[in-house]
Amino acid sequence: MLHIYAHRNTVPKTMRAIAKVDAASGLKLIEALVPTPGPGEVLIRVKKAALSASAVHTDRWDHWAQRNISPPVIVGHEFVGLVASVGPGVADCHPGELVIGEPCVACGNCRHCLGGHRHLCPDAHRLGQDRDGAFADYVCMPQGAIWHADPRLATDLLACFAPLGQLVRIARRFDMLGAHVLISGAGALGCMATAIARHAGARSVVVVDNHTTRLGLAATLGATRGVDTREANLGSVMRDLAIRDGFDLGIETSGSPAALGDVLNHLRLGGQLALLGLPSDEALPSWGQIINKQLIVHGIDGRDNLRDWERLTLALHSGLDVTPVITHCLPVGDFREAFERSAAGDPGKMILDWES
Ligand SMILES: [Zn+2]
């Protein structure tokens, strides 16, 4: 079900872009050359792009960013846009089509790619990290990293498909039906995880954070209980909810070593743990607890995108509602405000409108 949008026939030579220009804190709105799609590549005009935790790390230039970002680079990897033009040899992708790009651009040739597991490609390049990203008027990607989006869904929502796809991967990996789920972090990722866990049949979803407004948003997304770690502890909440043995599944979205320790303390024997939150510094988990509790730990980085995005689209058409997570849509010129709000812990997801 493809829909061709009206699109600009001419592509300008230069464009706006938000870039990490050098190895220091901060980002700059620059004028950059519009890339020309080579053989097998697609040029996309970005409509909406979403701030991610990694974009905030990149702005801050913390240890994670210093290890993973190669300036100068245009940042951003969560986006939706329209095909503007295609390079030689591109089939089934036409100007005006609404598309999302997989942020992790796989090589397409290794055994993992050829086996259909592109998210495991060891030679992948990441948008906004080691290849130019999507906080720009245009972004260029190989056709194999393009996914045709459902035009019935709002573009704000489609801009968030990258993190939502990660969470769908958790729902496919772990059986949430009737499970007690513990989510650490009530940022955008934790709130989206809350809605998906409820939709997937969790018996209870307890969300832990130290920010009252964020916990309020988690409640809107369906959290059974929000726990402000400054005022309450998980043990009393477990007693209230008659959770005797511990949580069945922990989803760590905060990147905080202390929060991870709290999750480990409250998982049951044989429990499962999904790790998504990027730590600013290396954080060692309580190794002994993982052994003694015989935990199943799964690092989640990226999507098995075709399956995850198809399943996400179907879930969104069958009652999954994550729209309350999207709290701000700002014009590109206000990008500094969006980053500062995110860094300060404002609840919800910040969207940049590249058509503004
Ligand atoms: Zn590969």
Image: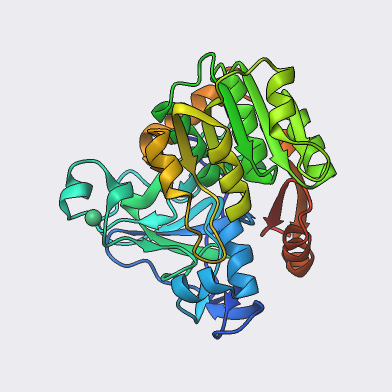
In this orientation, does residue 307 appear? Answer: yes
In the rendered view, does 294 fall on the left or right side of 216?
left
In the rendered view, does 23 fall on the left or right side of 216?
left
**Image quarter hosting the C terminus:** bottom right
Q: Classify 237 as above or below 88.
A: above
Compare residues 327 and 66 and report the one nearer the observer. 66
**Image quarter hosting the N terminus:** top left
Residue 127 pos. (x, y %): 45, 63
Q: Classify 344 as above or below 333.
A: above
Residue 45 pos. (x, y %): 54, 58
Compare residues 283 and 49 and report the one nearer the observer. 283
In this orientation, does residue 222 appear? Answer: no
Ligand 1 shown in quarter: bottom left
Residue at image x 74%, y 27%?
A: 236
In the rendered view, does 276 fall on the left or right side of 290?
right
Residue 247 pos. (x, y %): 56, 26
Residue at image x 70%, y 17%?
A: 241
In the rendered view, does 226 fall on the left or right side of 288?
right
